Amino acid sequence: MDYFLELFLGGLTRGSIYALIALGYTMVYGIIQLINFAHGEIYMIGAFTALIVISVLMSTGMNPVAVILIAGFVAVIYSCAYGFTLEKIAYKPLRNAPRLSALISAIGMSLFLQNYVLLAQTCDFLPFPNLIPDFECIEPFAHIIGSTDVVILVTTAVVMIILTILIRYTKIGKAMRATSQDRVMASLMGIDVNTVISFTFILGSATAAIGGVLIASHIGMINFYIGFIAGIKAFVAAVLGGIGSLPGAVLGGFVLGWTESFATGYISSDYEDVFAFLFLVLILIFKPSGILGRSEQSKV
Amino acid sequence: MSFGGLKALDGIDLYVERGEIVALIGPNGAGKTTFFNCISGIYAPTEGDIFIMKPQAGTAKRINGLKPNQVTSKGLARTFQNIRLFQNMTVLENVMMGRHVRTNAGIAGAIFRNRKTRDEEKQIVERSYGIIKKIGLAYYVNECAKNLPYGAQRRLEIARAIATEPFLLLLDEPAAGMNPQETKELDMLIQRIRDEENISILLIEHDMKLVMSISERIYVVDYGKKIAEGTPEEIKINPEVIKAYLGEDAY
Amino acid sequence: MRKFAEIRKSLYVALWFIFLTFPIMVIRINPLEKTVEWRWMNMALVGIGTFFLSFLWRYLISKKEEGSKRAEEKQNEKISKLRRLIENRKIIAGSVVAGALLAAVFPFVVSLYQTNIMTTALIYVMLGLGLNIVVGLAGLLDLGYVAFYAVGAYAYALLNYHFGLNFWMVLPVGAALGALFGILLGFPVLRLRGDYLAIVTLGFGEIIRLILENWNEFSFGPSGISNISRPPLFGIELSVQNATVYMYYIMIFLCLVTIFIVKRLQDSRIGRAWVALREDEVACQAMGIDRTKTKLTAFALGATWAGMGGVVFAAKTTFVNPASFTIWESIIILCIVVLGGMGSVIGVITGAFIIILLPEYLRVFSEFRMLMFGIILVVMMVFRPGGIISGVRRTYKFEGKNF
């Protein structure tokens, strides 16, 4: 039973991270119908920036909790900046181009960012210090859940709530929803579509960076390639839940997290990534609109 | 045909005899295009049947549930309300695409280009040009489809549909966006297609002048239901039709 | 005044990029030894670089936006000029003869190493032409192309290891297996929309690689299979030198066959259906074209060449392991097609030579190879989506002679 619980909670943690990254995919897809292939790279850059800040600050002997908070903040700022610039360079000029062109451009950007970090930093795995303190209150459950997991779960929940409020009740949220319905019409109604799109990228990048810092603390290792595989899996989560739907992305993240956790726990850990991909292929074949997505039928 | 709980089409019985020109009219949103989509296989009707009876064959064949391409190969061709041409292909190529379903060169034929394939290709070009000439697009034959004037694009859609050798042609608002002169030409063109090619025609149209002048029979639908059918003269004086078009107070 | 504003704009861009690249470009950390290295030089480079590049970027963007209409007309003119050049029989004959001579004597005038590189480039020409059928003609973005390449390579490696079959026997088997896998994968996924298709094929490619890596009993895991025999010439085993040259000629032959077949397919009933399907799927179906079958044909044909390419690759390197078949391999092949020009045979050949040969000869750049590929993909899509040599499709012109 403990083993089951451990796998369950492990899946939940994993799923939360996928959900955080998947939110970015889903928001961008909802607004401009583009699979932001470079989204995983933003997450990787967030983790790297955090590690750099941590390394610099640790040498000054600062309090670890303050360090991780500052590092997380800087990581979010930088990821947002990268997300913003990325959109301006690689996607904005292609706004009216065929979708295939934008997707190829996104792949190019992903390739560029990976190799940019590879060349400027290193290709080795770097240890990422775990600065999240141990909470005493969860001591009795320490064998099934760590304090990092708790932080991840709580942060994910908070981010989800903030995002929901932002999109449901604020003016920019309303503009985002209008833009996702019909971009041309929204701009005719006086919505600055470019700002909305930039804002969406920034929002998505921020959640990705939070995910990046959390998972780096959790796993304790990063390199330039982590963004790619995490990006693909988050995309699977987004599609699974129904791309374009925020609750869908979260749900998809959890389902994928559990699937992986149980499959590797009970079957074999060699094929961890195969399960995710197999899952993706199966969903797209049998229910391309995802769990919570609406099927769209093109009007003839 | 229903979408979720909405009944988009409810018990519309309609038939087209060989060599007839039949019109389907009704206010916007009445379900006319949905009806076409059901016939041409883009939607699978949830209820009801579509039968075709080819002149040679004695028995009627049920065709609902077939894919659009299978419906076309059975001899029903359609045009679209919002023009769907192959924009970056020439007029000739567009019509050649229509010949696709009546030809059968495969990969081997393409690679080895044997005599049969060469003959077939030649025949495709010749037949396509013949149709283009008949429709009156010969002037544009090598022009890119997207560069054609609006009226010519509509006619090209018809030409492309005829190239699939249908016995029934479904025209979805063929006169939409045409000026009176073009509409008049279209009127003549449709009649010529019926007479010379021996193709029956079912059309959706809002231009009443065109509808009244060429159709032998008219069906009127509103809110997915058939509200009247008959000859143009009968339809003109049908109170249900007037009510649907002009509202309750009109008379 | 305007000049001043432009300079100010570029200055802002430079400052922005200095800020953006600051942590990653300037600070280099070494968490093991707990040292931090500050590289202020990089900051200056980024600042100066982006300052000038931003002028270029804005100039190109404005040119693109301003003259998109005019450029189209101009391009048409250019195309017709190019086409006249291409259709000039004397020039065709001349360049074909020159090319053939060059290709024929190539292995005898350069070193073995160069011949080897050229063979690699030719393999990529073949792969590019195969992928071109899928991406360029049928408009299906296939990011798992390398899976079929792996299928071919492992088919030869395993059949050679277990049953001692030689290259010529396995070549058709590899092609057939490629096609078979293409159909198996294509059948369920080809109903999907373009961008979903890209991701599913990517997933499929990774699945194949992960299976090869983990299923030790079948594929010998990450260590791969070595000592695969080279192709024999009329049953005689050749020395390494001769085998390299022989391999080169085999590739020349296979490329010629590929070009011939791709050209013929392009101008056929099926080729037209592919192009039409890319333009408008609904209209295509209304024309009686079976969407799934037509897409499947393109997909399977593309996979066929990947399978063949895999067999040649295994025979050339005499060693295969899963590391050769990562997603990036698919992306390099995609790069070749995109850079050269989607749908254009000459474009793809040019693209393959640029992408494969340039990093080999410019060793300085080889470190930046993947970085450059990324930039190429973005820049090509933004400024020249048609590629270097945009696909000049042979349109069917009616000359009226037939009547």
Image (spheres, rainbow, N blue to C red):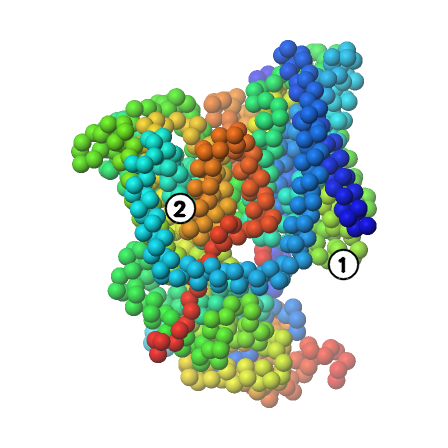
Q: What is the spatial separation of the Cα atoms under label 1 and label 2, in whole angstroms?
A: 45 Å
Q: Residue at x 47, y 71 (%)?
A: B142
Give the tally of numbered discs. 2
In the rendered image, the residue lying farthest to the front is C109
In the rendered image, the residue lying farthest to the bottom is B233
The numbered mark 1 sits on a residue in which chain?
Answer: A
Residue type beneath disc 2: Gly
SS assignment at label 2: helix
Q: Is residue C155 above or below residue A144?
A: below
- From the image, tell me which residue sits under label 1: A188
- From the image, tell me which residue sits under label 2: C130
Q: Position of residue C300 (x, y in %)?
A: 38, 47
Q: Position of residue B118 (x, y in %)?
A: 30, 65
The numbered mark 2 sits on a residue in which chain?
Answer: C
* Corner quadrant of residue A25: top right
Q: Residue at x 77, y 11 (%)?
A: A61
- C162 left or right of A12 in image: left
- A246 left or right of A106 in image: right
Callout 1 environment at 10 Å: few (<14), some (14 to 19), or many (20+)? few
Q: Residue at x 33, y 63 (%)?
A: B104
Q: Nearer the viewer, residue B108 or B170?
A: B108
